[in-house]
Amino acid sequence: MYLEKAPKVWSAVCIALYVAGIAYLGVGTLPDEFGLWLGLSALFLLLLLPCLAVPVSKVIYQRIRIDGGILRVGRERIPLTDVDPASVQAALQGALPTPAERYATSMAAIDAPVPGLRAAESPGPRLVGGGWAVPMGMDSVVISTRQGEALTIATRDRSAFLSALATAAAGVDKA
């Protein structure tokens, strides 16, 4: 019913720069210095991996999917019957945050495994998906369950996600 796909521009740019750099090094060194070229390729690969770590973690922990009566965010599954439709409508009616507000909110939504930074120790909403924080600058939505638990969900397209969630939650309520 709804699937939020991760943008792949950053990963494509990083991989293209890596391949272009290694190809440029290979023009002057191959086939005479294959070992040197291979060593430099591995060394530059160590620089590429941290650049790809954030996009990969976004795919693992912030991927959103709504289908079959279940809201899947990262590694968590929440039945749509548990989602409070009034909180979804309230979030949908709320004002869109400015980029500065998105950065401030993402910096405050932390659930790191460090004493003092655990969501269970703070009164704020719980971060859904299994990640430690909302990625910097990414938008987040706060909804609640029927049991009253507040949940923070990181999203790339706030209005599309909330519209799909409102439609799905209303459809489950009627069934």
Image (tube, rainbow, N blue to C red):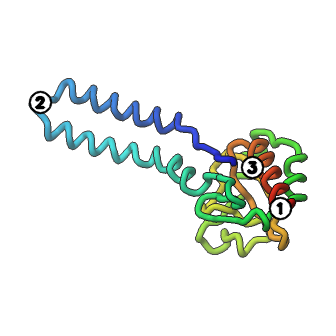
Precedes in sequence: disc 2 or disc 3: 2
- Circle 3 packing at 10 Å, graded few (<14), some (14-19), many (20+), is few
Relative image position of residue 114 (x, y in whole percent): 60, 71
Relative image position of residue 110 (x, y in whole percent): 67, 61
- Circle 2 packing at 10 Å, graded few (<14), some (14-19), many (20+), is few
Total marks in image: 3
Q: Residue at x 67, y 55 (%)?
A: 67
In this view, 29 is above or below 153:
above
User: Residue most toward the front?
Assistant: 175
List the residue tagged with mark 3.
Answer: 104
Precedes in sequence: disc 3 or disc 1: 3
Q: Tag 2, which secondary structure?
A: loop
Give the amino acid at mark 3: Ala
The circle drawn on residue 31 is 2
Precedes in sequence: disc 2 or disc 1: 2
Q: Residue at x 46, y 32 (%)?
A: 13
Question: Decide: marks 2, 3 in contact (CB < 8 A)?
Answer: no
Separation of residues labelled 2 and 1 (CA atoms) = 67 Å
Relative image position of residue 77 (x, y in whole percent): 65, 65
Q: Of residues 131 and 90, which is closer to you in this image?
A: 90
Give the amino acid at mark 2: Pro
Q: Tag 3, which secondary structure?
A: helix
The circle drawn on residue 110 is none
The circle drawn on residue 175 is 1
Separation of residues labelled 3 and 1 (CA atoms) = 39 Å
Which numbered mark, 2 or 3, is in the foreground of this view? Answer: 2
